[in-house]
Amino acid sequence: MRRGAGALSPARPVPAGASVWAPGPPIEERLARAGLPALPRLAWLEVDTDALRADLEVVRGLVPRATRLAAVVKADGYGHGLEVAGRTFAAAGADLLAVATLDEGRRLRSTLPAGPPILVLFDIPPAAVAEAAGLGLELAAADRGWLTEALAAWTAARPGLPAGTRLRLHVEVETGFLRAGLRPEAVAAAVRAVAATPGVQAAGLWTHLADPADQRATAAQVRRFRAAEAALRAAGLTVPSRHIAASGGLFVGAAADTELARVGLALYGVLPGGLVESRLAPAAAAAAGALRPALSLKARPLRVEAVRVGERVGYGGTWRAERASRIATLPVGYGDGWTRASQGRTWALVRGRRVPLVGVVAMDAVAADVTDLEPAVTLADEFVLLGAQGSEWIDPDELARARTTISWEILATMATRLTRVYHAGPGPTGLRLQGSEVFGGGTRG
């Protein structure tokens, strides 16, 4: 029986505003007060849109005044909800939004028809480039073969497009990540081909850092990028925007002279893994400490059961009660993104205290050992599996270390079947329920 083994303390101090735990209104009451429908199940995500706005302001403070900010909202807005994240960041002043796929770009443009430019960071089908341009999507060009096909498809489709429609491409440079991009020596030819195609503009030159915390590797990547820039200048070619730094690069000050910074994880209140606040420059360290995680995973128990000495809990009976125990079954499992890798190494918060999660994680449930809480836990108690409760806090980095993964994965794998409850200020403002967004003023399909 595991009792406290493997405890992981929060990666940073508990967020400002945390206090001694006190019970609040149940989720049903909070939603009813806001005129919102009830939840379909007793597990849900809460997204603090005030925190999203505040985090964008923190990040903006690290970006040089002349540098534009691209808010990355791929993977369903890092699990927070693509549409709400996109609208929130656009309203807070993001100059550009970035997604990973054409479908994400379509969804985002649908919710922001007059919003900022949207950059799709990975290749789309070449036949779809005209549609993308019509939606105001800017595209990454990371392979010469793709670029050739895309320019041909654009040329064929252009006569049928509205006058003034332009295809804007960001040419990716392979600088050492070896995932995508053109080698520095091939970049000038690619940009020349773009410039020679009517209606197409080379809008950007960019790369992605493999490990921003590794100063030597990052410096080598930046040197290769500079070589590509030099080749463009030698060929008499220019691009209006260069971007290298994502969240990690921004906090270590990599390539601060570029015109655009692409920021994802930090906008959701999470410092990229591998970065240590004490080793950052003072301004970056202060910004890291000011980030506010925006996402919480909460649940109420399906049942609380008295378990006798020797009885086993869950699949395979891997957890055996060594004393008379009380076990709460929470309706969160690997179907929600709470993976089996969490088994025996993670915690929940209830009444402001940590309790261990025990046994094998099932598709739809996980067990919590609540034996030590008095009075006994009831079905009315609210558990927090990710987020803060009172003075305790479980953050994405803690979960990532417990699962031997990274914070990005913790957020991005939160299942869409978990209802997102959005709130600003004291109470809920809306939710994403069964594929639709519901706000005080009605429903968005």
Image: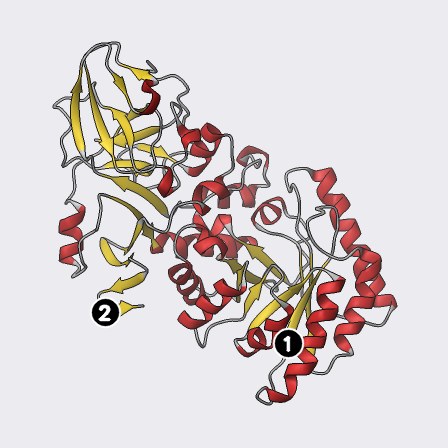
Classify mark 1: helix, strand or loop. Answer: strand
Q: Nearer the viewer, residue 40 or 51?
A: 40
The residue lying at 74 percent from left, 44 percent from top is: 219
Residue 407 image offset from top left, x and y in percent: 48, 40
Image: 14 above or below 250 = above
Specify which label sits upstream in the sequence, 2 or 1: 1
Crowdedness near tag 1: few (<14), some (14–19) or many (≥20) residues, C-alpha within 10 Å? many
Left or right? Give the position of 220 relative to 251: right
Residue 90 image offset from top left, x and y in percent: 45, 66
Q: Which mark is residue 247?
A: none
The residue lying at 22 percent from left, 65 percent from top is: 440
Q: Nearer the viewer, residue 245 or 32?
A: 32
Q: Quadrant of residue 332?
A: top left
Residue 217 image offset from top left, x and y in percent: 73, 40
Q: Nearer the viewer, residue 329 or 237?
A: 329
Q: Quadrant of residue 202?
A: bottom right
Left or right? Give the position of 375 relative to 279: left
> Given the image, on which type of amino acid does mark 1 rest?
Leu
- For the residues bearing labels 2 and 1, Cβ distance under 8 angstroms: no
The residue lying at 53 percent from left, 36 percent from top is: 277
Q: Which residue is mark 2?
A: 442
Image: 84 above or below 395 = below
Classify mark 2: helix, strand or loop. Answer: strand
> Given the image, on which type of amino acid does mark 2 rest?
Gly
Query: How many numbered badges does the structure rendering display?
Result: 2
